[in-house]
C-alpha cells in the first residue's frame, strides 16, 4: 500500500525488519482491517534480547505480539521470554551487552525459570483509546518537559 504513494507517509521505507511506526500500526487497524488486530512474530533484529526466538524460522523472528487498535496503534505488547540461560547469554554477547551489567536478570534464570511470557498495557494508551483522545500527550497525567527530571 505504501508503494502506491510514498508521499502520503512520513515513514515510507518499510520492509521486513523495519519497526512499524504509529502511522503503519494505525493504518493496519483503521484501514486494512477496520478493527483491532494482533501482529505477531516480529523480526528478531528490532526486539529486545530477552525475547525468545521462534524455532520454526530458525530464529529470524521472536515470539512477540502487539495488539493494534484504531485511533491509537499499539495498545498492548507482549512476548515469550527466553528461559534458556545459555541462549540468553549468547544473545547478549551478539548485541555487545556487558553480561556483568545484567547479573540480576541472569540470576532470575540461573536460580530457576520456566517457559513464560509477559505483556504490558500502556495506561496512557488505554486512556487515549477509551476516551477517543487524538494525541497521547493529552492523556499523560504527569507530562514530561525539558528540565523536570529529578534523577
Image (tube, rainbow, N blue to C red):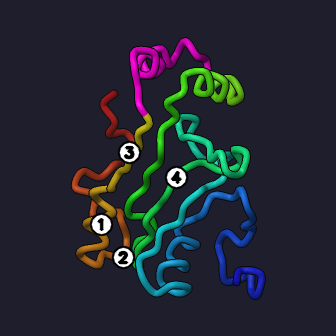
- Secondary element at image label 2: loop
Q: Which sits earlier in the primary sequence, circle 1 or circle 4?
A: 4
Disc number for residue 138: 1
The residue that mark 2 highlights is: 134
The x, y position of residue 144, in whole percent, is: 34, 48
Q: Position of residue 27 (x, y in %)?
A: 54, 80
Q: Which mark is residue 18?
A: none
Q: Are marks 4 and 3 in contact (CB under 8 Å)?
A: no
Q: Which of 51 and 20 lies nearest the eye of the viewer?
A: 51
Q: Nearer the viewer, mark 3 or mark 2?
A: 3
Foreground disc of the pair 1, 3: 3
Mark 3, residues whose alpha carbon is within 10 Å: few (<14), some, or many (≥20)? Answer: few
Determine crowd level at label 4: few under 14, some 14-19, many 20+ residues with C-alpha closer than 10 A: many
Instruction: Work out which quarter of the rendered image holds the C terminus and state it.
Output: top left
What residue sits 29% from the left and 52% below the top? 143
Give residue 97's position: percent from left, percent from top: 62, 23
Residue 64 image label: 4
Q: Which residues are magenta?
A: 97-114
Label 3 near label 1: C-beta < 8 Å? no
Residue 128 versus residue 145 in the image, above or below: below
Nearer the observer, 125 or 75: 75
> Which residue: 54% across, 27% down?
84
Callout 4 secondary element: strand
In depth, the one of 104 and 54 nearer the eye is 54
Residue linked to disc 3: 118
Disc nearer the start of the sequence (3/2): 3
Amino acid at each position: 500500500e505504501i508503494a502506491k504513494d510514498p508521499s502520503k507517509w512520513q515513514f515510507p521505507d518499510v520492509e521486513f525488519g523495519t519497526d512499524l511506526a504509529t502511522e503503519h500500526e494505525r493504518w493496519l487497524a483503521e484501514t486494512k482491517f477496520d478493527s483491532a488486530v494482533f501482529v505477531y512474530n516480529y523480526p528478531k533484529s528490532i526486539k529486545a534480547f530477552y525475547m525468545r526466538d521462534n524455532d520454526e524460522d530458525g530464529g529470524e523472528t521472536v515470539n512477540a505480539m502487539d495488539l493494534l487498535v484504531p485511533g491509537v496503534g499499539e495498545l498492548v505488547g507482549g512476548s515469550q521470554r527466553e528461559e534458556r540461560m545459555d541462549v540468553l547469554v549468547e544473545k547478549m554477547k551478539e548485541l555487545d551487552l556487558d553480561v556483568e551489567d545484567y547479573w540480576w536478570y541472569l540470576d532470575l534464570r540461573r536460580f530457576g525459570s520456566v517457559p513464560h511470557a509477559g505483556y504490558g498495557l500502556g495506561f496512557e494508551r488505554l486512556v487515549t483509546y477509551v476516551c477517543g483522545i487524538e494525541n497521547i500527550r493529552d492523556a499523560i497525567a504527569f507530562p514530561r518537559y525539558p528540565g523536570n527530571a529529578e534523577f
